[in-house]
Amino acid sequence: MPAAADAPGSFSEPAFTRFLFRAPSLPLCVVYAALASVVTAALVAFPSDGAYSFGSVLLLVFLGPALVAGALTVPVASALGGRISWRRSFLLAATSAVIPLPVVALERLVVYAIPAALPPVGLYLVFLLGPVLWFRHMSLFGISSPDHARSLPASLLQPVLAFLGILYLVSPTVPLVIEGLIFLLFGFLACALLLRAADRPLRREFGHSGVALIRPLLDHINARDPGATAELERFFARFSVPADLRITLLAIRSGGRIKATIALPTVHPGPFAALGSSDLPRRLAERLGASAGTVFVPHTPCNHDLDLPTGAEFSAVADAAVALLAALPATGEARAGPLVRPYPDSFARAQRLGDAVVVTVTQAPEPTDDIDFAVVDPLVRAAESAGARIALIDAHNSYVEGEGDLTYATPKAAKLVRDISAAVDAANTAATAGPFRFGAASRTDYSVRVHGIGPAGLRAWVVEAGGRRSAHVLIDGNNLLRGLRAPILEALAPLVDEAEVMTTDNHIVHEVDGGINPVGERYSGAALARDAKALVEQAIADLTDATAVSGTRAIASVRVLQPAWTQRLLTSLGDTVSMFGNAFLTTYLLLLTSSLVVLLAAR
């Protein structure tokens, strides 16, 4: 069994994934809005020249407008075709109350050093309206409605209510009203410049507004809204191309029924959340149904080039799997053998089960990630032409960001092909004609948010053959942090002679704060090792005499995302975030500078 040679690796998320977050609970958002209003109002009112009090500023300019805007934004946005949750509405109100804080703090320092610099009360307060509108409108344009006319009324609620409070607080004059309107206009124009700049990368690359995708993305993640899902999948489908895919099934039979099914479609479980072929392990298991027993859907050697763009394309793959399972012979083959590695540095380990050889490949303890489909497909097809079947699995079990991909025509790719061939020969040599025993177990009480593990949870199968016992543990997640594979295998060492741990590469785990979410980031390696050991113990208790039978079915002209399309999208998203960050600061400073010119001219 592999020893603890894995060295722990660091985890770093792409910058754009950090924008994925879930708003706090509604009561907490209301509390945040109140606290933000109190802090900002306190800075505005103290020290005071006596013209206004803390209480009046708090109620009329900050807290009152924030709470009323939090309550009215939802119905106003909905009436104009937008959509925003109550939680996000009050969180936006709270954040908008904080936006003036840097300006207020700087102004207080200046006034403390130079008391004569204190601006007129009303003018100073209306000066703060521009940044509030700037922030509210950029937010609502993205998360509610990507249309200025439809989102602007809701954006104006908080600053306009504050404006009315200011006019009540001080003696209103025509110049003050005009100045307030100018500050609001500057806030809108600065926001429009920001949104235009942030939209450029995706418009240039894909001819589509990136900001317009924010709302359907949030609706898909938070509510699995069918309309939002359809809108996103239409975007993906525009860039898809037809491909000829395949699916291989290995059915383990025992006691006159299928006890377990290992399903290996040449499909990548992406691109994200539950779009296209994401959440492939759960969805395919549900389509195969209870008659398939415990369904295992490990990752197969492929990358994002074989992401499915829509649910319709997934259905084509699932239909082929259901038909293939129904067409498999009612009797299987008892020939099987132990899990073997042909030589110590081999990337491949193999085990004969029935009429197929199950091959699991990994570069661990080195980083290991996606394998180009073109690297191994010729080998698999050549084996089938010779009357053999290889059920090939990419263990996907040693994550280091940006490392571990195996690409075509590289020395490592050539080594992988040699290792697979040698592992298959070794597995066939070690196989015996006698019966083998098979056991399976699963556990699904995990959470993507808490554990970083998808709906299919942890699953394990155990095989006794040739006098040895082996185990495979499959985790429904996006790779396994480097360094965590070894302790899991060590925990299994007292139970089995050989073992491997795998992940499904399910991209549903991306829809949380931080995005990438590899297994082990949220749930400790010790806990994973403990759970894997308990699951293998259950699978051992489930061991029964078994046979195995396999089959492969071609799936012609299934649409997949274009080669390197996902990388183009991720690059454009990274450019968007970079552009947004630069434009955020630039437009904020431009807004403050232009407003300051008006304020000084008004004095």
Image (cartoon, rainbow, N blue to C red):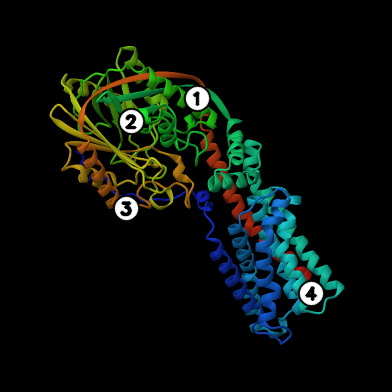
**Taking 43 as reference, is 272 above or below it?**
above
Q: Is residue 207 left or right of residue 372?
A: right
Secondary structure at badge 2 equals loop
**Residue position marked by numbered label 4 in the rendering:** 167
Q: CA distance from mark 1 to mark 3?
A: 37 Å
First in sequence, mark 3 or 2: give its number. Answer: 2
Calculate the distance from the C-alpha at mark 3 to the C-alpha at mark 2. Answer: 30 Å
Residue 406 % position (x, y): 38, 32
Label 4 is placed on what type of residue?
Leu
Residue reaching furthest bottom?
50
Q: Position of residue 399 (x, y in %)?
A: 36, 43
Task: Name the residue at 65% across, 58% down.
Answer: 586
Q: Residue furthest right?
A: 174
**Which amino acid type is marked by label 3?**
Ser
Q: If the image is split into quadrants, where does the C terminus sit?
A: bottom right
Question: How far apart are the two marked residues, 2 and 4, measured between alpha carbons?
Answer: 71 Å
Q: Residues within 10 Å of mark 1 (few under 14, many from 20)?
A: some
Residue of label 2: 293
Q: Nearer the viewer, mark 2 or mark 1?
A: 2
Q: Which residue is mark 3?
A: 524
Relative to 590, does residue 141 appear above or below in the rendering? Answer: above
Type of the residue with mark 2: Gly
